[in-house]
Image: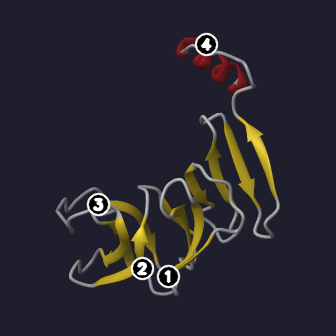
Amino acid sequence: INTDGTGQRVLHDGFAQWIWKDPTNGTVWVYYSNDDFSGVSRLRLDDPTIVEKVYSGNIAHRFSLSADGTCAVGEFPWPNAGMLYTRTGQVDRKDYCTGCNSYIAPDNSYFVSIMAGSHDLVTLYRPDGSSRDVRLIPPGLKLSPSSTVTRLKSQIS
């Protein structure tokens, strides 16, 4: 689909991971995994016949890019979070915790977040490797869906 909502079409078999616009030339790339999540490739949105392999190992269905496209974060494979250097295809674990829902900030700060445990804790990593944990749900607290909504609404107000 084009950015204006027109042009719905099949680009390639697989699972779309990320869409990225190259800041140097405006080319829009679609990053995708094979149906079995063995590797990541990218194709040009304006010409899907132009395909480039980015990573050849196994990956979970989470993958995100920095704004400059040089770094990606994902589980390579789950639950092993890591940073992928897209120009070399090499993965660096950077002493990241294991987990899921790992993301890199969509700017060029290279901050990374990884959800750990039973999805009640997120670890935030700075580019220098330092980290801190942010607990989403206090230990021992049991929340029903309605109390969660009420709690979130009170935090927004």
User: Is residue 31 visible to the viewer in this orientation of the structure?
Assistant: no
**In this rendering, which labeled residue sits more in front, label 1 or label 4?**
1
The residue type indicated by label 2 comes to Val
Q: Position of residue 157 (x, y in %)?
A: 71, 23
Element assignment for label 3: loop
| Picture residue at 42% right of the left edge, 72% below the top | 57
Q: CA distance from mark 1 to mark 4?
A: 44 Å
> Label for residue 36?
3
| Picture residue at 62% right of the left edge, 16% below the top | 143
The residue type indicated by label 4 comes to Ser
Residue beneath label 1, please? 89
Q: Position of residue 108 (x, y in %)?
A: 66, 71
Q: Residues within 10 Å of mark 1 (few under 14, many from 20)?
A: some
Please tell me whether residue 21 is drawn above or below residue 79 in the rendered image: below
Element assignment for label 1: loop
Residue beneath label 4, please? 147
Q: CA distance from mark 3 to mark 4?
A: 38 Å
Quarter placement of the N terminus: bottom left
Q: CA distance from mark 2 to mark 1?
A: 6 Å
Mark 3 or 2, nearer chain start: 3
Q: Quadrant of residue 121?
A: top right
Residue beneath label 2, please? 54
The residue type indicated by label 3 comes to Asp
Mark 1 or 3, nearer chain start: 3
| Picture residue at 64% right of the left edge, 21% below the top | 153
Q: CA distance from mark 1 to mark 3?
A: 19 Å
